[in-house]
Image: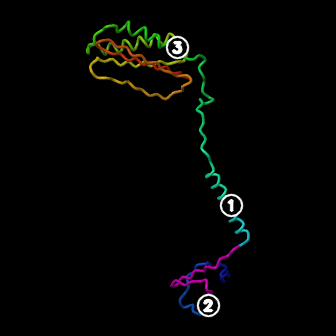
Amino acid sequence: MASKPDGKRSSIASVRDPADRAAPKMPLLRSRLGNVSINNQASWSLTGLLAAQRMTKNLKERRALKVNKKTEIVVPQPPSYAARPSEKIQVPTIKHILEDYLPGKIGEMTYDTTRAPSLVKEVSEEVKNLVKRVLPARYKVLCVVNLGERGQEDIIVVSRSLWDSHSDSYVAHVHQNSSMFCVVAVYVVYCE
């Protein structure tokens, strides 16, 4: 590229004056678009070619790494920073408490819609207090009681939880007589 008289270099795309007809003939690689001419001459350098080769090689290597990545199935483990309980829950003990308590409390009671709400609260509180006596330190208890009248229909009680299976657990027990059913679920969760 040649320098202009005022010290500035000319650009590849420049606007040409139509009165400037005495300019030398353009090479074949130059095309004219009205008053604008575009120079398509490629200027290649060895360092530019080497840099382009390195970039494409790096891109190819990265792409190959992404394609070859395999998915590994990891065995779920508790995080290393989580504290573990010193003692585990005795699930059979809690199950035995529920099996002994419910027949004694409900027995052959008949279903009464006015008494049912207070009975549910009473059973829930008493079961929580009984279970707390046998739990190790730092455990929390949640007790859910479902009480209803027995008729011709069936009922299914379902629950889902997300917790640490190493330290948390649950126990459920169903007691029924001729006029009512009672489903008690006790969830025991370790608090760090």
Frontmost residue, 47 versus 146: 146
* Disc assigned to residue 135: 3
Label 3 sits on a secondary structure element that is loop
Amino acid tagged 3: Leu
Magenta stretch: includes residue 32: yes
Magenta stretch: includes residue 10: no
Label 1 sits on a secondary structure element that is helix
Query: Percent x, y for residue 12?
Result: 61, 78
* Disc assigned to residue 25: 2
Which color mode does the image show? Answer: rainbow
Residue 15 image-quadrant placement: bottom right
Q: In this image, 179 relative to 185: left or right? A: left
Specify few, some or many for label 1: CA neighbours under 10 Å numbering under 14, 14-19, or 20 or more: few
**Residue at the (56%, 85%) spot, across then down:** 16
Query: Percent x, y for residue 25?
Result: 62, 90
Amino acid tagged 1: Lys
Q: Main secondary structure of the magenta part?
A: loop
Specify few, some or many for label 3: CA neighbours under 10 Å numbering under 14, 14-19, or 20 or more: some
Frontmost residue, 10 versus 80: 80
